[in-house]
Image (spheres, helix red, strand yellow):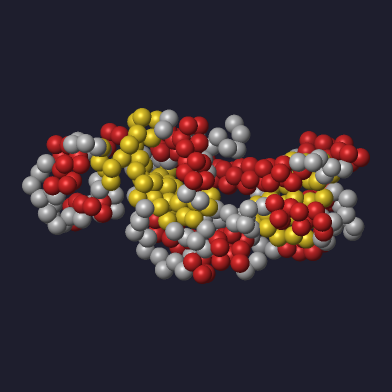
């Protein structure tokens, strides 16, 4: 399975480090990258090592507990996600290092040998004369990819490999969590659903996403921190039209239930108040079948309630890149 056929439970932009003593290559690579990609350039491999040996921030935390049958229950609460969104240093995590082979002081392979973080992905730039060394380093597991520097598409390949490896890194960090989340088993390995989510991310310019179990769905955010929540539910949990005909249910909700599937109790249980006083418009959503799995439904909430004092001038990707 390649890295694009599985959806990470959470993903956010990380920093790529590029090391090359040729300033022209560094300038060309930076100019080619999209503006919302954090990247740090070094002409000196020794300076790069100083940056790479700094301690990384902790990854997004997962809350686990034992259920009644002693199975692991995994929680991704919206509150914990909101707290993580206030950590602007989340973008400073280094996921990929790209290094030229032939450099003064130490070569690219020697630089990679000094890296102690097993989760940092490594791409080696090499000339034709050094290709055998690169193949050997790849076979030994020291590097994840290598690119011939003389390839006319070298920069495009480095960016594509970096994106793929960054995604693979998140999936590897999340390890066995997938098997403890029912939605993940049904959807996050489903190629059609993954393509659908990837399309949403590109079309709406989202840069980070987080799976949440309460409410169940995927929280997306763009480079300025604007959030949307894709609600996910099993089709069997969707209320029938008859369930909405009780007294006190607003007429527009009753009428809508006859034309579309509705998910209710998105953020607040109905037990907290009377039917008449319940905030139906806020807690009710029209849903449709999930691509690739008709046993699940989905609906997008464009203004989810986030209990977070998010300041785009401090906590957004845009602010982080501005400070690089």
Residue 142 x/y as whole percent: 77, 43
Q: Is residue 86 above or below residue 97?
A: below
Which quarter shows the C terminus?
Answer: bottom right
Residue 75 x/y as whole percent: 41, 50
- Answer whether residue 224 is visible to the viewer in this image: yes
Residue 295 left/right relative to 103 = left
Q: Which residue is at a point 35% across and 56% down the rendered structure image? A: 303
Q: Which residue is at a point 35% across and 40% down the rendered structure image? A: 298
- Answer whether residue 75 is visible to the viewer in this image: no
Residue 99 x/y as whole percent: 79, 51
Q: Which residue is at a point 84% across and 56% down the rendered structure image? A: 22
Residue 165 x/y as whole percent: 65, 44
202, 273: nearer the viewer: 202
319, 270: nearer the viewer: 319
Q: Which residue is at a point 47% across and 60% down the rendered structure image? A: 225
Q: Is residue 301 above or below residue 45?
A: above
């Amino acid at each position: 399975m390649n890295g694009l056929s599985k959806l990470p439970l959470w993903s956010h932009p990380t920093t790529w480090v590029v090391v090359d003593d040729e300033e022209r290559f560094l300038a060309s690579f930076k100019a080619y990258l999209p503006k919302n990609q954090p990247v740090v350039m070094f002409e000196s491999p020794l300076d790069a090592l100083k940056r790479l040996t700094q301690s990384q921030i902790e990854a997004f935390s997962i809350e686990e507990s034992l259920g009644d049958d002693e199975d692991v229950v995994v929680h991704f609460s919206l509150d914990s996600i909101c707290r993580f969104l206030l950590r602007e240093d989340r973008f400073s995590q280094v996921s990929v290092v790209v290094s030229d082979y032939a450099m003064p002081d130490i070569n690219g392979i020697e630089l990679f040998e000094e890296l102690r973080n097993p989760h940092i992905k490594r791409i080696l730039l090499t000339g034709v004369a050094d290709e055998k060394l690169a193949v050997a380093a790849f076979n030994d597991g020291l590097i994840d990819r290598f690119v011939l520097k003389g390839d006319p598409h070298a920069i495009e390949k480095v960016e594509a490999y970096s994106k793929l490896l960054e995604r693979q890194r998140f999936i590897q960090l999340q390890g066995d969590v997938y098997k403890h989340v029912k939605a993940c088993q049904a959807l996050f390995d489903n190629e059609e659903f993954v393509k659908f989510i990837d399309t949403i991310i590109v079309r709406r310019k989202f840069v980070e996403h987080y799976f949440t179990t309460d409410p169940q769905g995927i929280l997306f955010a763009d480079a300025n921190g604007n959030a949307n929540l894709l609600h996910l539910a099993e089709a069997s949990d969707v209320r029938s039209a008859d369930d909405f005909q009780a007294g006190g249910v607003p007429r527009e909700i009753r009428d809508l239930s006859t034309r579309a599937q509705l998910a209710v109790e998105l953020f607040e249980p109905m037990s907290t108040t009377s039917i008449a006083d319940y905030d139906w418009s806020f807690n009710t959503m029209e849903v449709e079948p999930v691509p690739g799995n008709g046993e699940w439904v989905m609906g997008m909430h464009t203004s989810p309630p986030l209990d977070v004092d998010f300041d785009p001038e401090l906590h957004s990707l845009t602010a982080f890149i501005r400070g690089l």
